[in-house]
Image (tube, grey):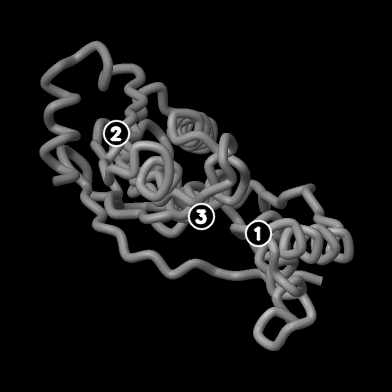
Amino acid sequence: MSTTHKPIVQSNSTLHRNGTGAGMAVVDTGTQVSGNRVDFNKLQSICTELLIAIGEDPDREGLRDTPRRFAKHWRDFIEYQPGNTNTSFEAISTDQIVTVSGIKVWSLCEHHLLPFWCEISIGYIAEDKVLGLSKFARIAHKYAHRLQLQEQLTHQVADEIQHVTKSEDVAVLGRGEHLCMTMRGIKSPSIMSSSVMRGRFRTQPETRQEFMEMIK
């Protein structure tokens, strides 16, 4: 069985505009779990075959335990459980921009199976609910722990933030470095940015600019 890991992510939280936040009530709508499971023994066999294919001896000292470590890494990555992502709070004053920035996650490029890291910033305009602070990081990790594209990752995070908060005004910005570009191909380090802007973040330039200023 895989171990459930609880990520430790330091984020900067900001509440802006009107509202005192008084009279909050917690709403917990359940725990999100992943249905993906890996074939641990097959992963070990694949690693052994890979070592042979690249001219290595899987029985030599230093590689004997590599297939098990390889399989464990994939199991921990794919079977990762983010925990509860749905806790929200009710009865706050509305029209606040809430932002969380600096959520750094690691994922795997689905084109080359090489890692990429992405720093996620999230914003939304609160209506009748605000999302519990730790849930932002849990949601980001939930969608990072799979074969992924950064553009898809930012959309999936935005979809879930919108679903949980019931807000139409959601912004997600991702900035990441992809090792499929840094260590292969052009071999040039660079930062890729992708954003999803919905509701007032898309239609009101001043709201979008305020979000960008807040996450600096």
Do tag 2 and tag 3 residues touch (Cβ < 8 Å)? no
Mark 2 residue element: strand
Mark closest to the chain's N terminus, 1 or 3: 1
Residue 105 vs residue 49, the one in the foreground: 49
Q: Residues within 10 Å of mark 3 (few under 14, many from 20)?
A: many
Question: Spatial distance from mark 2 to mark 3, Cα to Cα?
Answer: 21 Å
Residue 78 vs residue 213, the one in the foreground: 78
| Position in image of residue 164 (x %, y %) | 52, 37
Mark 1 residue element: loop
Q: Say if 149 sits above or below 76 in the image.
A: above
| Position in image of residue 74 (x %, y %) | 69, 60
Q: The disc labelled 1 sits on which kind of residue?
A: Gln
Q: Residues within 10 Å of mark 2 (few under 14, many from 20)?
A: some
The label nearer to you, 1 versus 2, is 2
Kindly identify which residue carries mark 2: 193
- Residue in the image at 30% along x and 49% along y: 100
Residue 138 bears which disc, if any? 3
